[in-house]
Image: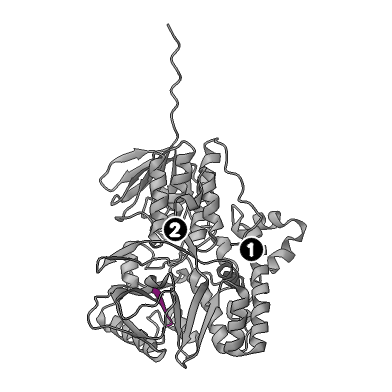
Amino acid sequence: MANSAPIVTRPAVIVVGGGIGGIVSALILAAKGCDIRLYERSDHIGGKMRSLRIANQDLDVGPTVLTMRWVFDHIFRDIGQHLDDHLELRRSPAIARHFWEDGSRLDLFSDPDRSFDAVEQFAGAKAAKGFRRFLQYAQSIFTHANRLFIMAKSPALREIAKASGRDGPTAVCKIDGLRSMARALKKYFDDERLHQLFARYATYYGSSPFRAPATLNLIAHVEQKGVWLPVGGMAGLANTLASLAQGLGAALTCNCPVDKIVIENNQVKGVVLEDSRFKPADAVIFNGDLAALAQGALGVEAKKAVPRVHRKNRSLSAFTLAGVTRTSGASLLPHNVFFHTQPYAREFEDIFKGHRLPEFPTVYVRAQDRDKHQAIKGQPERLFLIINAPPVGDHTSFGDEVIQPCIDAAFSLLDRCGLNIDRQNPTFQTATPRTFAERFPHTGGAIYGGATHSMWAPLRRPAAQTNVHGLFLAGGSVHPGAGVPMAGISGRLAANAVLQNLGLPPLPPLATSGHGAS
């Protein structure tokens, strides 16, 4: 009688949540031979990366740009593919156009020499020299933070010290974490408008520049090294990752909330879905906001696996408007920011101290039909407006009496900056902190996890591996933090931790050469 071939059972991994971190984990582990089941409570894969259908057109209403594309180049190489074979990305020559209500305007570009010339024309030779020094400073911070933190598997201080060797304490100081972003910027810029422009980068991490460590000035370097626009919209990145994962056998199920992560004797056993079905697993990756686990939303045992999350440490939320309408007056680029001449600190005092929508909001306008920098001659175009907001959506209703003054203030600012938006016929779809709180329970609408309001805040984020055997974490509220590329890194770290836990070959380290390059 012939010997039968041994039955090989693939490790079963369940991913809870289909944000960028979750889908990256699912993709990599499917490519490595795991049996992947991903459950997403909403109707789409991508988490905050989503689109709306308005006037028969798709509008991006989440992240609007891709930076650090090398992260996804590496992820595609992990599965034996090339990013450019699956997604068309166009590098934008312009980073953003900035407007002030006094009539001034400044464009920044991916070419630093063009930006240098633009700053000189905008604010003079001294400001341009300060800008040049600032970019060198931001690059230095990125170089150290990339090696010590972003690339580390854990944010623990001992890991950072170990990674940096004997010069650990000196190297940590080089990330400029002991003073605020706003204070550091004063060293480079006398012009309040430039101070305001670069301080705004703290909001990319959901934080106030007056409380965030100067380490976050590295974001200026990241943007200077490349802003990428997926042809067809940012949601295309999530859809591409999902399609590849499915092609490798991963089962992705939307509209399917997970009720509980089952843990026995400190070992993951699987999950229970909302309809009470039990799904066994050798490992579970939680790709959701840490606050949900910390508040026991997926069971008491899972709650024990993560640190406590305090409401007072929540990041920014947002108030957004999306619509298709006509504009006139000021010429737009794909990315535009409109500033008040009021003291910038007032916006963050309103949000983080007053817990209210700002009286003088900065307004970001994404003009999606300008991606090729074409002129829009009186035709309706896709617009997405973002205003920073407090993360209080779990206990504030945000009725018309709150929303309408904020809308009026935003459009009044745009008018004073020279941009006229037709508000008569289009139907703007709005989202408030309450909207985001309902979409992402237990967050209050915070979009970026915890706020980064001290040097220690990033170091407190948990790593992919938890103290529960078989339970792993991915997403913007865990190491290395918020943003599309960071979420991608978190997903890769979670996948690698699962592989090592299962005794499978780990992923190669992310290459250290070329980081920050385009």
- Tally the marks: 2
- Amino acid found under the numbered disc labelled 2: Leu
Predominant SS along the magenta part: strand
Which residue sits furthest right? 166
Q: Is residue 21 above or below residue 408?
A: above
| Residue found at x 65% / y 77% | 134
Q: Specify the color scheme.
A: one colour
Q: Quadrant of the N terminus?
A: top left
- Tell me if mark 2 has few (under 14), some (14-19) or many (20+) residues whose alpha carbon lies within 10 angstroms of its own: many
Residue under label 1: 145
Q: Position of residue 11 (x, y in %)?
A: 45, 35
State yes or no: discs 1 and 2 in contact (Cβ < 8 Å): no
**Residue 369 among magenta residues:** no
Residue under label 2: 290
- Tell me if mark 1 has few (under 14), some (14-19) or many (20+) residues whose alpha carbon lies within 10 angstroms of its own: many
Q: Is residue 331 left or right of residue 200?
A: left
Q: Position of residue 409 (x, y in %)?
A: 35, 87
Q: Which range is magenta?
A: 362-367
Q: Quadrant of residue 216?
A: bottom right
Residue 497 in view, yes or no:
yes
Q: Position of residue 98 (x, y in %)?
A: 48, 82
Closest to the camera, between mark 1 and mark 2, is 1
